[in-house]
Amino acid sequence: MGAENPRELPKIDFSGVDPASAGTESWKSVRAQVIQAMESHGCFEAIYPQVTRQLRESLFRNAVKELFALPLDVKRRNIHHKPFHGYLGEIPALDYYESLAIVNAPLPHATQSFTNLLWPETGNPTFCETVLSFSQKVAELEGMARRMLMEGLGVDKYYEDLTDSMWYLLRFAEYQAPAAQEEEEKKLGYVPHRDTNTMSVVCQLQKDGLEVQAKDGEWILASPSPISFIVMAGNGFRAWTNGRVGAALHRILVGGGVTRYSVVLFSVPKGDFRVEAPPELVGEDHPPLFEPYYDDEFVRFCVSEEGTKTMDTLAAYTELVRARKAEA
């Protein structure tokens, strides 16, 4: 199942830009690369040394390992009543996968609440400080990439409003190595899918595991360096841009006797925000591709029996809504 395709994802250096550098020549240079990468792949590798090696080392070698070493009954305290908002594990056909999540992770009180939940006696200040610092830095990268895309589409006047309409989810994931007799053959750690949210920024400890499908159907191995991240558009941004930005279809493979760890920051539409393309991105040449929706209702469809049967949940959801309108 592994990808033997030598192609690589586009690689973009963000070391010379920050949120305050919008409009500078360096910003415009990076922006042009971001637009091209998203048009061709729906994702790219971002070199981003603003998250230092020391911070990543502390995150993976200490915080993440400490988190997954907790007893199962403790980790289950993170179970959330909304899909994808908290603990995930013991999922049929995903034998190797387990994860936990922090809602609003870049906000100090949210990360502290998560930490207090799992370590009520100590509050684990080292874990909290590491995760908070990481979340805030990665949120800046997500914001820059999204702003550059909106500038390229000529709709950057909506940037602040769109930012205000979102929140961030930080997800820690562990993909256990398959049994010794299965090590040579890659196993599916997570099924092929497009993220439901706006954008995702993936940080992984191992170079291998994440694969992205190219337009010709081939799978490209994402192999970020110790100072880079994989930035992907999700169905939320695909819908908001009326398909101008595609959502990357991706999967996780595990094998080789190595347990894989990743930490992903997702930008997610708030519950009262209607995901709908602005008028500038809709017209005779670009008719509306998707039905407007609220994130909660779309996610409910994604986890329904019908939603789990397709890899293009946004198109399937739109088809369902339009069929219901036609019957009304």
Image (cartoon, rainbow, N blue to C red):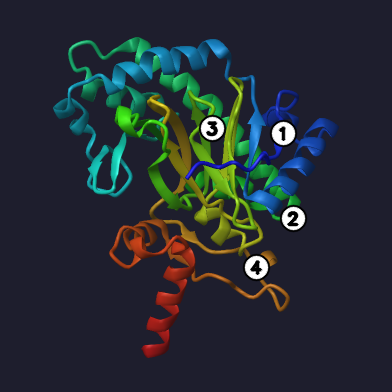
The span from disc 2 to disc 1 (Cα, nearest Å) is 21 Å
**Residue identifier under label 3:** 139
The three-letter amino acid code for the residue at tag 2 is Gly
The span from disc 1 to disc 3 (Cα, nearest Å) is 17 Å
Quick one: 308 or 159, which is closer to the camera? 308
The residue that appears at 47% across and 35% down in the rendered structure is 265
**Residue identifier under label 4:** 279
The span from disc 3 to disc 4 (Cα, nearest Å) is 27 Å
The three-letter amino acid code for the residue at tag 3 is Ala
**Residue identifier under label 2:** 154
Of tags 3 and 4, which is closer to the observer?
3
Q: Earlier in the sequence, mark 2 or mark 1?
A: 1
Q: Earlier in the sequence, mark 2 or mark 3?
A: 3
Quick one: 274 or 181, which is closer to the camera? 181
Residue 122, image quadrant: top left
Asked if residue 285 lies left or right of residue 178, the reply is: right
Secondary-structure class at tag 2? loop
Q: Residues within 10 Å of mark 4 (few under 14, many from 20)?
A: few
The residue that appears at 42% across and 32% down in the rendered structure is 184
Label drawn at residue 12: 1
The span from disc 4 to disc 2 (Cα, nearest Å) is 11 Å
The residue that appears at 34% across and 61% down in the rendered structure is 308
The picture places residue 178, in percent across and down from the top left corner, at 33, 32
The picture places residue 112, in percent across and down from the top left corner, at 32, 22
Quadrant location, the C terminus: bottom left
